[in-house]
Image (cartoon, grey):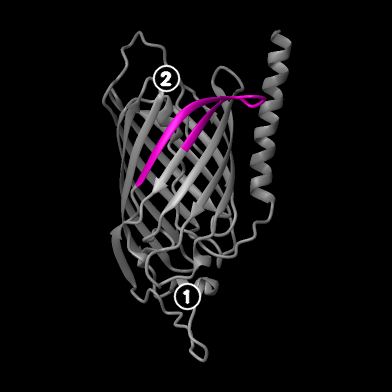
Amino acid sequence: MNGSRSRARRHAAACACAFLTLATLLPAAVMAAAPWAEPLPWEAVTGDTGFTFDVQRFDDPDSGWQVDAFGMTSVMHQGEVNRVYVRWRHLDFHTAGRSALARWPEAVPPVADGETPDLSWPGEHSVAGWGRPELGLLAPLSLPLIGDSLFGGEVALPFARNALYPFAARSTSLRLALRRVFRLGERLTGALVCERVLNMSAAGEDLADEAFADLTVWGGSLAWRPARSADLRLSARDAGPGECRRLRLSLTVPWGEGRGFTLGLMRGLADAEDRLFATQVTVAVSIALDTPSADAPQTPPEEGP
């Protein structure tokens, strides 16, 4: 029995490492951007209910784009094991005079015959506003052949300015995800994720339908838990138009009773003309509302790639 478990762990570790390598090396075909979507907060499934406050900086020196974002995530119980969450972020988008339509001409809305499309949109060098609020559900799920997994469903609502595109838009999207976690050792876990994102057209005539491409996303991660409530994670994801390939390294450590501190660095690996950003830096603080007692069993957090 122990030999079978050991072989299964080695196979799972090999699969996770192979996926991380493939997601980094395989080419990605990028045709158009799509509204940016944060990784699903899988850690909420095994974590406490409460709040997470984060500050993010997106930066791309080639395009001159820079985004400063401040966000909040609220996690609540839904039954005994499910979690529901709400996320919302305020964005300060600095375009450096490089418009979205100039970077992705296929996103130009239709024009009458003989007219020349205006590629200067959105035109502003600095745009500020709230992004799309996201409502989500995370739930354990047991499937034939796959086994114990996690389901994630999220709806992004159309309460944002189109001028914030591709980091937000006045559009709706539906996101469905399945995640399988593999226990590789006492302190090491791996995970594979598949997502399907259905983007709907934005309200108004600022962008063509091609600016809201549907996405199929594959992701994988390796997480090491060196101590109680601490977590070091390397993750990768590969998607279709506008999302391409990304690598992320994050570290989460406890900060007092019922609080945690997270530092993350994400790197975009697409060509300069295709990527939304070159680097993303995240600093987050989590505050739990239902901290478990010292005698309660501790479960490693789960975080999406």
Q: Can residue 89 be seen in this view?
A: yes
Camera-side residue: 112 or 51? 112
Look at mark 2 in the image and give the residue it sits on.
228
Task: Place residue 292 in its image quadrant.
Answer: top left
SS for dot 2: loop
Question: Where does residue 67 sit, x and y in percent of width and height?
Answer: 37, 59
Residue drawn at (33%, 55%) of the image: 131
Q: Which of marks 2 and 1 is nearer the N terminus?
A: 1
Q: Could you tell me the amino acid type at mark 1?
A: Pro
- State which quarter of the image contains the N terminus: top right
Q: Position of residue 226 (x, y in %)?
A: 49, 23
In the image, residue 56 above or below residue 6: below
Magenta span includes 262: no
Residue 196 relative to residue 231: left or right: right
Please give the range of residues in magenta: 134-152
What type is the residue that disc 2 sits on? Arg
Residue ranking furthest to the bottom: 114
Q: Looking at the image, which residue is at 34% across and 73% down?
A: 125
